[in-house]
Image (spheres, rainbow, N blue to C red):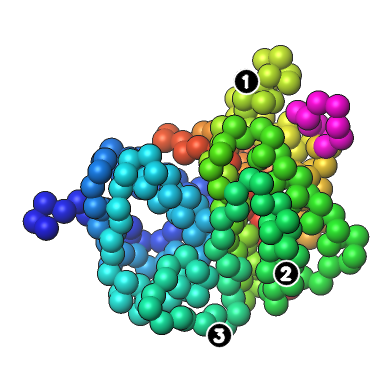
Amino acid sequence: MDNKIVLTLRDRFNTNFSGIKRLFEFYKSASEHHNEVIYLDFYHLTWFDANLSALFGSILAKLRKENNLTFSTDLNFLKEHFDVLFRNGFLHSETTIDDVQKSTVSFKSFSLDDKDNFINYIENDLLNHRGMPTFSENEKDSIIESLIEVYCNIQIHSKSEEPFYVCGQYYPQEGVLTFSMVDLGVGFLPAIKKKTKGAIDNSYDAIKWALEKRNTTKVGSPGGLGLFNLNSYFHSTNSNFQIISGDTFWSLEMENTLIKKFHFPDPYVGSILNLFFKCK
């Protein structure tokens, strides 16, 4: 045990560029190891946005599969200080820890041929959560259809056979429910670059293209409303929406600022959508 590999998660992990960048850095550090047991040190962690379990879970699964890594940690410490990671199903213990606060939207992964269960999760776990705003029927239908289109796009374009990860967390003091969706595919750019015959050649422009109404890389079938409708909804409710793909972090909140995007020095794979539902 003297030579055990220890990776430390410290300070805060929020659903923003900094928090996501540091999870990407964790992935890079861990991916340098193969066929090892990695000890995860959470003793210096002060905060972890529980919805980021979707991204963290995808990272650990990828490392287990591709690098044959095994992870261990002090579960008793986490139970005492970060019980939300048990309440949302990200971690498991011998005794079930109920989500008494009803603040979590369960951590789940869906295979890309499991559309029915994904729709069931969106309708029952996400949209019926106590932290959700009151929707009109049209708004609710539009959000369900948009999320289904996102799921189908992953199926068609991501070139991934890996599961799709989701998790949400309600923050009552802020009056916001944040929902994260993560796929392990190739990201937005390859299909859009092909569709635009090379006119779009970077991830930021690919994200912006995908947000335009009726822009779709599907052939012979309608599409292109999913991200447009989500963006319109979050814009109309003065809340936030983030897309991370390739080396780019895009955020609705940054659209009216001088800095329109951030770049990751060590990008991950696939794409991440973070949806911020404002209930106040």
Q: From what the image shows, is residue 39 above or below residue 219?
A: below
Q: Counting residues from the N terminus, which is met first, the one under dot 3 or under dot 2?
A: 3
Q: Is residue 231 visible?
A: no
Which quadrant would the C terminus be assigned to in this image?
Answer: bottom right
Rounded to the nearest angstrom, the CA distance separating label 3 from label 2 is 18 Å
For residue 238, the mark is none
- Which mark is nearer the camera, 3 or 1? 3
The answer to which image quadrant residue 6 occupies is bottom left
Q: Is residue 217 magenta?
A: yes
Q: Nearer the viewer, residue 13 or 69?
A: 69
- Give amino acid for label 2: Asn
Which residue is outermost to the left?
2
Residue pointed to by mark 3:
100
The residue that mark 2 highlights is 124
Residue found 45% across the figure and 73% down from its top? 86
SS state under label 2: helix
* Whole-percent x, y for residue 136 in the image: 89, 66
Label 3, secondary structure: give it.
loop
Rendered image: mark on residue 201: 1
In this view of the protein, which residue sits in the foreground, 147 or 277? 147
Q: Could you tell me the amino acid type at mark 1? A: Asp
Q: In the visual, does 154 lie left or right of 52?
A: right
Residues rendered magenta in the picture:
214-223
Image height check: is 49 above or below 267?
A: below
Which numbered mark, 3 or 2, is in the foreground of this view?
2
